[in-house]
Amino acid sequence: MVKAVVGANWGDEGKGKITDTLGEQADIIVRFQGGANAGHTIVNNYGKFALHTLPSGVFHQHITSIIGNGVALDIPVLFNEIQSIIDRGVPKPKILVSDRAQMVMSYHKQIDAYEEERLAGKSFGSTKSGIAPFYSDKYAKIGFQVSELFDEELLREKVVRIAEQKNVLLEHLYHKPLINSDDLLAELKEYKTMIEPYVCDVSLYLYEAVKEGKEILLEGQLGSLKDPDHGIYPMVTSSSTLAAYGAIGAGIPPYEIKQVITVCKAYSSAVGAGAFVSEIFGDEADELRKRGGDGGEYGATTGRPRRMGWFDIVASKYGCRIQGTTDVAFTVLDVLGYLDEIPVCVGYEIDGEVTTEFPTTSLLAKAKPVLDVLPGWKCEIRGIKKYEDLPENCRKYVEFIEERIGYPITMISNGPGRDEIIYRNAV
Ligand code: GDP
């Protein structure tokens, strides 16, 4: 059985924690898109970890962790990450990397940084991990696929061609040092040595695994609103964040994805630029940021403070719909226990009209939040294991949101730890 764990919003919904929790039952966890530009934070028996490239399954010894063909593979980052978890006492995980994955090259990261510099105040807030230049090259058919590392003749010819093309940009647009094709070849040879033991025909491996009835989790990065087609373009990421893309980015038939678990957080947060209708500011935002997540809402990759807001029903209803949600995992509910009253964004007012349907980007820029206020529960809910044991106002908050977004909340996360989860049969 194949399940996808994906985000409903701007990312940072707690997908890592949900994947880690569901990992107890899984045999295989696959990353199918994105790169080292976002992170999952996971708290377990070994400590607290921020993973950027490794799938969240690496802490379970029974799991095979897979980097699918849809991922932007940053080999040095992958290596450092494997080493860093081993150094902290985690047994060496079983990792496979698709022979069809493409590699983030050092010039992708450089060009990402140069472009941010060039755009200055108009930048997209990139993490400078090379993701946009990487995916541009992939679709322009000038990327390097892992399989090509094993064809030296091809590489020798290709590095010259690529250096020539990149150097036009480097010289005339960015006025930066040029690429030497011999250095590029040396970089690729180094990557070959590093990645060789992990390379696998992943779609074939997964085909066999599905036939054998293995439990497979597809782990998404970021969330619906960062999808290049269905998100807040152009303030999006460069690969699809949707469960449907899991089929492509892992190499499995779409009809094998039987469950789409969409992770939604009990309030909102976002990193980077772009419209964020239910955003809050000042002390109100600082308080939520400080109490949020596990140790505050600061980017796992960049450490930058996240933008904060109230739960947004319009964005989340849309985010769940576009994922094809079967189940909602509702996270960080424990964080809201300090509030007397909890505002929820129930609609957008655009040009004097209220809507609950998420608009395209130019209309979104005009949207003003319509807020409802729900009573808080004013207590700690960590440690509670059964839904009925949650305070009444807390259950009312969950049920209000469930009804408005229109998808069943079957999991509630009330703490960062693997076991801090309440399973629930939705009404
Ligand atoms: P991801 O990229 O979607 O995995 O999201 P993050 O890495 O940003 O995870 C969100 C943060 O919230 C992490 O620090 C988690 O440890 C933490 N977290 C996840 N679920 C819960 C929860 O239910 N309660 C609390 N307090 N923290 C949580």
Image (spheres, rainbow, N blue to C red):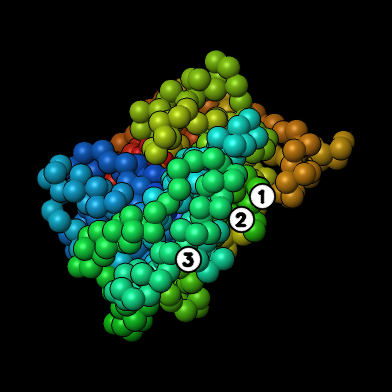
Position of residue 370 measured from the top left corner of the image (x, y, whole percent) = 73, 33
Ligand 1 placement by image quarter: top left
Pointer 3 local density, CA inside 10 Å: few below 14, some 14–19, many at least 20: few
Q: Which residue is mark 2?
A: 228
Tell me how far mark 1 sits from mark 3, CA to CA: 32 Å
Q: Which residue is mark 1?
A: 233
In the figure, 326 relative to 113: above or below? below
Q: Earlier in the sequence, mark 3 or mark 2?
A: 3
Pointer 1 local density, CA inside 10 Å: few below 14, some 14–19, many at least 20: some
Q: Earlier in the sequence, mark 2 or mark 1?
A: 2
Query: For the C terminus, which image quadrant?
Result: bottom right
In the figure, 54 relative to 286: above or below? below
Q: Which residue is mark 3?
A: 161
Type of amino acid under label 2: Pro
Position of residue 412 measured from the top left corner of the image (x, y, whole percent) = 43, 46
> Which mark is in front, 3 or 2?
3
Residue in front for this viewpoint, 93 or 75:
75
Report which quarter residue 68 is drawn in. Answer: bottom left
Q: Residue at x 59, y 37 (%)?
A: 118
